[in-house]
Image (cartoon, rainbow, N blue to C red):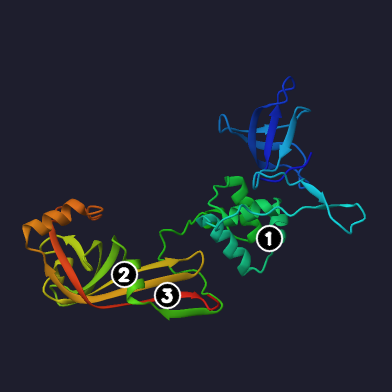
Amino acid sequence: MRAHLGDQLVIESQATGAAKRDGEIVGLHHEDGTPPYDVRWSDTDEVTLVFPGPDAHVRHLEYEQAMTTRETQPGTGGMEAPSVVAPPSGAHNPGDIGRRVALERQRQRLSRRETADRARMSTTYLAYLEEQPADPTLATLIRLADALGTTAAALRGGGADLPPGQGQALPHPQLRDLSPDECRTLLSTHGVGRVSVSASDGHPAVVPVNYEVVDDAIAFRTAPGSVAAAAAGAEVAFEVDHVDDALSLGWSVLVVGTADVVTDPEVTGRLTRHAHTTPWAGGEREMWISIRPTSLTGRRITPADQ
């Protein structure tokens, strides 16, 4: 019996042949994949050391297809050749961990096979992790991190509290301008952006605010006398961006326009009722300010071949 991390250990009932217990193999004690195994049982979520008996077998579930499936190929003299296990059909939707694993592997110019061998897991399981929103166990992350010369915390996004953009730049980046329609789409309807103002002491300031998009205008709540309130009656810049450290991609949208206090009680009431969130900063922030764009520009960084 041999197994990889992420495989499933199934204990069958000798009377019926049906599975009576199963769990994920989260730890190996021998490099060749032979028992014993650390198994996280699906019924209790506990991890125990298991020496499989005759009623146990290993099932490879990377794509819920048996990795041992083989087919006879023409021209092989009747020899059996392993079939290619393909990922599930449809567009890939990788999770953050998978993207970080794939990026680090590509930066080190490692193939999936090389990385999987180093981490003692199957290539198809690694492909699954990279291409699907998976939730690998800590044991799997530790082995992957060791194979890639990084840490499990880094693969999990342990630098989330650090400023974005500390990842390595793309080898051949492309910086392109966004159309107004693309900018409006990225602004979407709400989120967190930054407004640039001249504070009451005359110094420039940039303040993050929760914003809404209403009839193409940017609206945000603040308190009278706050730094953000200094935007009222002035021409300001408002910026929204997104940085993907895992893939070294990003975009930014810049709005320039005059900011005005919303004074109509009916309008302010409607804005408050339909706001997607209350201001993260908390406190009494019932003063709505609206920025009507006179300029809308944006840029996006992508690989040169996209």
> As drawn, which residue projects farthest toward the right?
77
Lateral position of residue 121 relative to residue 218, left or right? right
Q: Quadrant of residue 101?
A: bottom right
What amino acid type is highlighted by mark number 1?
Arg
Q: Secondary structure at mark 1?
A: helix
Could you tell me which residue is drawn at 71 percent across and 27 percent down? 12
Residue 168 percent location from the top left of the image: 52, 72
Q: Secondary structure at mark 3?
A: strand
Which of label 3 and label 1 is nearer to you? Answer: 3
Query: How far apart in space, not on screen, are marks 2 and 1 (Cα)?
Result: 39 Å
Residue 131 percent location from the top left of the image: 58, 56
Q: Earlier in the sequence, mark 2 or mark 1?
A: 1
Query: How far apart in space, not on screen, are marks 3 and 1 (Cα)?
Result: 29 Å
Tell me: residue 197, above or below residue 20: below
Residue 219 percent location from the top left of the image: 20, 64
Relative depth, front residue between 144 and 274: 274
Query: How far apart in space, not on screen, are marks 2 and 3 (Cα)?
Result: 14 Å
Could you tell me which residue is drawn at 62 percent across and 67 percent down? 106
Q: Earlier in the sequence, mark 2 or mark 3?
A: 2
What amino acid type is highlighted by mark number 3?
Arg
Q: Secondary structure at mark 2?
A: helix
Q: Which residue is mark 2?
A: 184
Q: Which residue is mark 1?
A: 112
> As drawn, which residue projects farthest toward the top?
15
Could you tell me which residue is drawn at 12 percent across and 58 percent down? 268
Q: Which residue is mark 3?
A: 300
Which of label 2 and label 1 is nearer to you? Answer: 2
Could you tell me which residue is drawn at 89 percent across and 57 percent down? 76
What amino acid type is highlighted by mark number 2?
Arg
